[in-house]
């Protein structure tokens, strides 16, 4: 089984769960969209920084073109939404963990491109707009297909990143409800 197949199979429940909870945000409403971006801000920068500290550029040389935290922070600032406290990223102990974490972040780009269509008129959406190196997703998926990384370790890391996104969404939804 390829690492991509193992990640897809080993995280499908987490992916569905995160899609469901983030689906509760109405991106057409400014307040909901701000909370959606805040939830992502609790997770994405922490994960990207952890990946960088662990040396992701060694595995993915075009990493700087892939990361999105600056776009996310710019969108949040354009909406005058204060920066929320970041959550702690899961440990990035080895190549398998790095690839598992990037799998979640790269997958979120695909979802983001679809979600961008739902963003309210006049609201900033650079974070959700497709970008990155041309052919970057295919290159990453090909890398996963050929990676000899520990499947269980990659799946565990991906599940931890999905859990971080879920926790971030729950925090924002709880704040909106109170």
Image (spheres, rainbow, N blue to C red):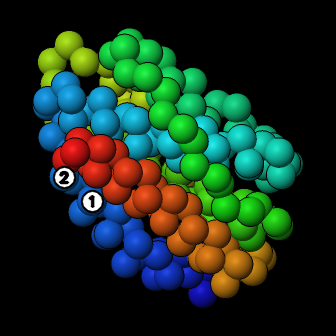
So how many labels did they put on this image?
2
Of residues 34 and 116, the one nearer the viewer is 34
Place of residue 171 in the rendered image (x, y in percent of width and height, measured from the top left): 37, 51
Place of residue 90 in the rendered image (x, y in percent of width and height, measured from the top left): 67, 61
Image quadrant containing the C terminus: top left
Element carrying mark 1: helix
Residue highlighted by disc 2: 24
Residue highlighted by disc 1: 21
Residue in the image at 67% along x and 84% along y: 152
Q: Quadrant of residue 129?
A: top left
Q: Is residue 115 above or below residue 17?
A: above
Element carrying mark 2: loop
| Left or right for 77, reference 149 | left
Distance from Cα at disc 1 to Cα at disc 2: 6 Å
| Left or right for 131, reference 54 | left
Q: Is residue 57 above or below residue 4?
A: above
Of residues 135 and 157, the one nearer the viewer is 157
Task: Tell me whether circle 1 and circle 2 mark residues in contact (CB < 8 Å).
Answer: yes
Residue in the image at 35% along x and 62% along y: 18
Place of residue 99 in the rendered image (x, y in percent of width and height, measured from the top left): 68, 62
Place of residue 104 in the rendered image (x, y in percent of width and height, measured from the top left): 52, 58
Residue in the image at 43% along x and 22% along y: 82
Q: Is residue 75 above or below residue 116?
A: above
Bin the neighbour count of mark 1 within 10 Å (Cα to Cα): few under 14, some 14-19, many 20 and up: some
């Amino acid at each position: 089984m390829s690492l991509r197949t193992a990640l897809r199979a080993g995280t499908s429940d987490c992916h569905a769960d995160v899609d469901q909870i983030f689906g509760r945000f109405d991106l057409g409403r400014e307040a909901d969209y701000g909370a959606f971006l805040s939830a992502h801000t609790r997770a994405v920068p922490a994960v990207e920084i952890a990946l960088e500290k662990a040396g992701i550029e060694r595995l993915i040389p075009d990493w700087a073109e892939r990361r999105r935290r600056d776009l996310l922070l710019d969108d949040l600032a354009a909406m005058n939404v204060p920066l929320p406290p970041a959550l702690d990223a899961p440990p990035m102990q080895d190549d398998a963990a790095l690839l598992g974490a990037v799998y979640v972040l790269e997958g979120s780009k695909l979802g983001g491109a679809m979600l961008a269509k739902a963003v309210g008129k006049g609201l900033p959406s650079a974070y959700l707009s497709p970008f990155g190196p041309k052919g970057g997703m295919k290159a990453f998926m090909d890398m996963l297909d050929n990676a000899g990384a520990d499947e269980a370790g990659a799946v565990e890391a991906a599940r931890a990143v999905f859990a971080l996104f879920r926790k971030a969404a729950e925090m924002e939804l709880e704040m909106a409800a109170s």
